[in-house]
Image: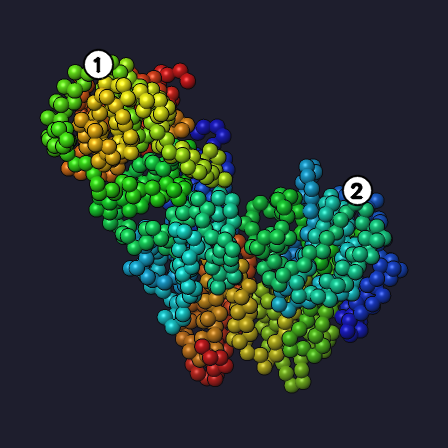
């Protein structure tokens, strides 16, 4: 758990070891804690050897998709014909997710070190860390840390730039992020070409999440075998993962657990469980874009890529949103839909129009003016919004709607039949 | 199958296309037009409207035909249930914020949203009638363009045209989600010399031409393939006529000349075609007056005049006259010691940055090159001087010419000449009233087609002048054949070989390059 609480004994503290320790933010403090040793080691290694080490560790992307990190690095051209770029996705804006923020707030040098190691591995001379616009404190901390590290000349010939976002959720999508870095409107690009072929400025680019890169120095320092050993369930999911727990929970915050850890222990033990007199109703385990789990599904769920999928959702970014029995699922889903309608970049028709329409129907239901056929319409609309657009924002809006109607249909029906009083005016 | 080609099947039709071809283009070869909005062959691919969803065998989900390249052995179904329902879904979503104001929309009848909705849209909407549609007021984008944001489907063709083709990025997509609209730079206007193309590119009635506003419904228009008369570039155009009046000029695709575009000058250069002060009958001089006569009498008078004259002759011609007419003019004057010239009006050159060798040319002379190939020169001043002592001066549609001559003036024209010393005035067809050819600045010979009849007794120049030769041609096509048989630059060409897109001069069979 780290800051602000003490870590729970069941946590495996790797990334969050120095959360809450102000001295770790400074360059000197970080070096004193063994920082930048991994970078020194990596810079002395062949880039391919660094990539192999990460590949062997089993590290997978922590941004949400869970793509094997080392494998991603190998997609970069073998022969270097021009500049390579590394982008670091620090635009953490998935509702319910706040792990990258803590990494940047407390261990900025961990991210910088991981960034430099990754840049070395993919032979990039420039790395951009794209930091979410609203992250004022992490921005200040990162700026200070980068200045100190640059003064100490630890990055060799690698240049790291901090780039500040302007507050659009969609800029966390990797290609939209690249457009944004280029100074363009943050619209996702059609793929192919994939970033490893034509990324930022049209050059081969790798993009990684903050948490992914923060784990890299540990892998280099302690070895891939150690990291691979951090595994409680599926061997395809290794290492530790930060979970941001929020919602109807006694002790919200970040917890760091080994892959395969039971979700129910996170909720009931580490985060203090439900408020007195309340019981768990539902949980969104991987940030707002993934299917909602019921109480039963939640309590059976193991926190790794395979385990959450088995439970019927996705590990995503690790933003665990907890709902107790006081939660109005219809209202919660409307809030999510409204968020996506607000953040749609407006390129794809299904997303631009579909997210807004979904919101309107949800609002109508909450205003007591819904009809039973609205539920079928919502499902059909969601189907139409799934798998047909450039990026997955549209799918992300449809996902909670589909799982919500499937799992909490009676709550929708109560608004429609008048059993529940309207909570909105439409 | 030929080497270097990719073989695939689209709706059970086998096609072979070059590597890198997009599915949407390959489908055209299979005779399938995949419905689409944002895709346009003259613009970079955006892949945003998601309308061209098709089913590709072995792909996990529907693919957009505009951004998917062909692959060997691909099996594509554009009309499968899945593909169709994907597109029907897009249409339903496009219509939830689109006003159903087709009865007052200029685009109705040539609207891709109407067409594809009719083709595969839902019969009715599921959008609640109580939900308001997105509203934004009409914006004045520039000299000739209005933006009606309520009708906009955000296909971004206009934005991409200004950014990537005109290279003057004054338009963008403003705002996000369903609040989005096409915005214009607050300090800019859509006044690029080629900006009118955004109106053609717009698949719906969101971008409108002020010039054409409420002039006609699309189904009232007669469309004729033609060539722009605005300059020497020779852009291929379509003339839209309502009840014999030209009301609009639109680009006609020709990848060798203008791709899919025309400039605003050319777009607006049609009012002269509708002028009312036409000469409608042959006129012959009777003392101080000109008397209307029939063609037999008029042509007899010309023959007599030519027979009685000797020495030198001068032709002062319009560079808008047809190649065929100019050829027969030179034939009529062949037995004289003749010189011919045309006057070129000069203007500003305005290139379209994103397309090589495409500009509004400074020389506003659609057939100057054709005249040159037939022996006419640009030395108009010298010709005027020579006219002073010439026995015969033949003027073709140059009403402003100020001619001083001791000889006889024969005037072929569409409008009454400013000078009144012509012995004979012969009423001539305008280019919209005849079949003919122009040669553009690069030597491309291009046909234009008759769009309406001639007023009263007016006749095409080739007919009038052909009557004065031994072998009067019976049609424009025959007139061209006669020229092609004699003039090297046109050898091997005919109306059939020129087709709708034309040929480079010298490209005909049997002519060394």
Parent chain of label 2: A
**Residue located 24% across and 42% down the image:** B275
**Residue located 29% across and 31% down the image:** B401
**Quadrant into which the N terminus of chain B falls:** top left
The 10 Å Cα crowd at callout 2, few under 14, some 14 to 19, many 20 or more, is few
Q: CA distance from mark 2 to mark 1?
A: 94 Å
Secondary element at image label 2: loop
Name the residue nearer the viewer: B513 or A335.
Answer: B513
In the visual, does A414 lie left or right of A97?
left
In the visual, does A376 lie left or right of B425?
right
Q: Which mark is residue B433?
A: none
Q: Are marks 2 and 1 on the same chain?
A: no
To which residue does mark 2 refer?
A: A46
Marker count (numbered): 2
To which residue does mark 1 refer?
A: B310
Q: Work out whether A236 lies above or below A4.
A: above
In the visual, does B163 lie left or right of A295?
left
**Residue located 24% across and 47% down the image:** B242
**Residue located 52% across and 68% down the image:** A337
Name the residue nearer the viewer: B60 or B403.
Answer: B403
* Residue B418 placement (x, y as % from top left): 25, 35
Report which quarter residue B481 is drawn in: top left
* Residue B146 placement (x, y as % from top left): 40, 55
Name the residue nearer the viewer: A58 or B390.
Answer: B390
Q: Work out whether B353 lies above or below A230.
A: above
Report which quarter residue B458 is drawn in: top left
Secondary element at image label 1: loop
């Amino acid at each position: 758990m780290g800051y602000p609480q003490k870590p729970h004994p069941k946590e495996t503290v790797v990334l969050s070891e120095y959360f809450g320790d102000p001295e770790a933010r400074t360059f000197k403090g970080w070096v004193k804690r063994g920082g930048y040793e991994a970078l020194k080691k990596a810079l002395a290694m062949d880039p391919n050897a660094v990539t192999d080490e990460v590949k062997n560790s089993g590290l997978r992307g922590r941004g949400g998709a869970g793509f094997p990190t080392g494998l991603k690095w190998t997609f970069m051209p073998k022969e270097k014909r021009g500049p390579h770029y590394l982008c670091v996705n620090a635009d953490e804006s998935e509702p319910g997710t706040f792990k990258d923020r803590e990494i940047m707030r407390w261990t900025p040098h961990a991210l910088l070190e991981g960034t430099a190691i990754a840049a070395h591995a993919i032979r990039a001379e420039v790395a951009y860390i794209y930091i979410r616009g609203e992250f004022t404190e992490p921005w200040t901390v990162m700026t200070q840390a980068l200045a100190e590290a640059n003064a100490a000349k630890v990055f060799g010939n690698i240049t790291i730039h901090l780039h500040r976002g302007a507050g659009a959720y969609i800029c966390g999508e990797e290609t939209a992020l690249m457009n944004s870095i280029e100074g363009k409107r943050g619209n996702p690009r059609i793929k192919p070409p994939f970033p490893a072929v034509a990324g930022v400025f049209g050059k081969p680019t790798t993009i990684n999440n903050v948490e992914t890169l923060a784990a890299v120095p540990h892998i280099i320092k302690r070895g891939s075998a150690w990291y691979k050993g951090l595994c409680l369930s599926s061997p395809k999911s290794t290492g530790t993962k930060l979970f941001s727990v929020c919602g109807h929970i006694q002790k919200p915050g970040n917890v760091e657990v080994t892959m395969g850890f039971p979700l129910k222990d996170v909720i009931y033990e580490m985060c203090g469980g439900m408020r007195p007199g309340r019981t768990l109703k539902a949980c969104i385990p991987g940030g707002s874009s993934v299917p909602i789990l019921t109480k039963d599904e939640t309590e059976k769920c193991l926190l790794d890529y395979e385990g959450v999928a088995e439970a019927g959702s996705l590990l995503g970014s690790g933003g665990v949103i907890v709902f107790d029995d006081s939660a109005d699922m219809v209202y919660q889903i409307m809030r999510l839909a409204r968020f996506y309608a607000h953040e749609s970049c407006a390129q794809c028709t299904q997303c631009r129009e579909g997210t807004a329409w979904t919101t309107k129907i949800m609002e109508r239901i909450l205003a007591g003016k819904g009809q039973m056929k609205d539920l079928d319409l919502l499902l059909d609309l969601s189907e139409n919004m799934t798998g047909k657009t450039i990026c997955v924002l549209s799918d992300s809006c449809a996902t909670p709607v589909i799982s919500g109607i499937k799992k909490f249909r009676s709550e929708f029906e109560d608004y429609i039949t008048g059993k529940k009083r309207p909570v909105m005016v439409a | 199958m030929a080497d270097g080609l990719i073989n695939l099947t689209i709706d059970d039709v086998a096609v072979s296309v070059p590597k890198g071809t997009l599915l949407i283009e390959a489908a055209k070869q299979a005779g399938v037009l995949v419905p689409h909005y944002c895709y346009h062959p003259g613009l970079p691919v955006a892949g945003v409207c998601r309308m061209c969803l098709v089913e590709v065998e072995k792909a996990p989900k529907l693919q957009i035909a505009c951004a998917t390249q062909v692959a060997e052995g691909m099996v594509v179904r554009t009309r499968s249930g899945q593909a169709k329902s994907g597109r029907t879904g897009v249409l339903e979503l496009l219509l939830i914020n689109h006003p159903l104001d087709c009865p007052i929309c200029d685009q109705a009848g040539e609207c891709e949203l109407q067409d594809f909705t009719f083709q595969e849209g839902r019969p009715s909407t599921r959008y609640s009638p109580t939900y308001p549609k997105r509203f934004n007021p009409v914006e004045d984008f520039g000299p000739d363009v209005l933006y009606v944001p309520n009708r906009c489907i955000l296909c971004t063709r206009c934005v991409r045209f200004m950014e990537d083709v005109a290279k003057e990025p004054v338009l963008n997509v403003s705002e996000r989600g369903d609040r989005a609209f096409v915005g214009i730079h607050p300090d800019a206007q859509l006044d690029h010399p080629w900006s009118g193309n955004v109106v053609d590119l717009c698949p719906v009635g969101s971008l409108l031409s002020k010039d054409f506003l409420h002039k006609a419904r699309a189904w009232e228009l007669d469309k004729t393939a033609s060539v722009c008369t605005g300059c020497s570039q020779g852009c291929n155009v379509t003339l839209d006529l309502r009840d014999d009046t030209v009301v609009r000029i639109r680009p006609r695709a020709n990848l060798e000349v203008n791709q899919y575009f025309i400039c605003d000058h050319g777009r607006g250069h049609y009012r002269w075609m509708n002028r009312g002060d036409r000469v409608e009958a042959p006129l012959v001089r009777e003392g101080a007056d000109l008397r209307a006569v029939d063609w037999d009498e008029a042509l007899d008078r010309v023959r007599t005049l030519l027979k009685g004259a000797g020495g030198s002759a001068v032709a002062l011609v319009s560079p808008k006259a047809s190649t065929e007419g100019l050829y027969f003019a030179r034939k009529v004057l062949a037995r004289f010691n003749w010189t011919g010239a045309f006057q070129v009006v000069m203007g500003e050159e305005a290139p379209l940055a994103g397309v090589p060798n495409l500009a509004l040319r400074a020389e506003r002379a659609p057939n100057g090159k054709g005249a040159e190939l037939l022996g006419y020169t640009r030395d108009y001043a010298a010709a005027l001087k020579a006219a002073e002592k010439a026995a015969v001066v033949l003027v073709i549609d140059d009403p402003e010419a100020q001619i001083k001559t001791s000889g006889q003036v024969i005037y072929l024209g569409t409008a009454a000449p400013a000078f009144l010393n012509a012995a004979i005035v012969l009423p001539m067809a305008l280019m919209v009233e005849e079949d003919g050819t122009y040669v553009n600045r690069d030597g491309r010979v291009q046909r234009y087609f008759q769009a309406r009849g001639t007023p009263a007794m007016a006749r095409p120049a080739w007919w009038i002048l052909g009557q004065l030769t031994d072998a009067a041609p019976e049609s424009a096509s025959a007139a061209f054949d006669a020229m092609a048989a004699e003039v090297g630059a046109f050898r091997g060409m005919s109306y059939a070989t020129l087709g709708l897109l034309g040929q480079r001069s010298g490209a005909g069979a049997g002519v060394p390059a």
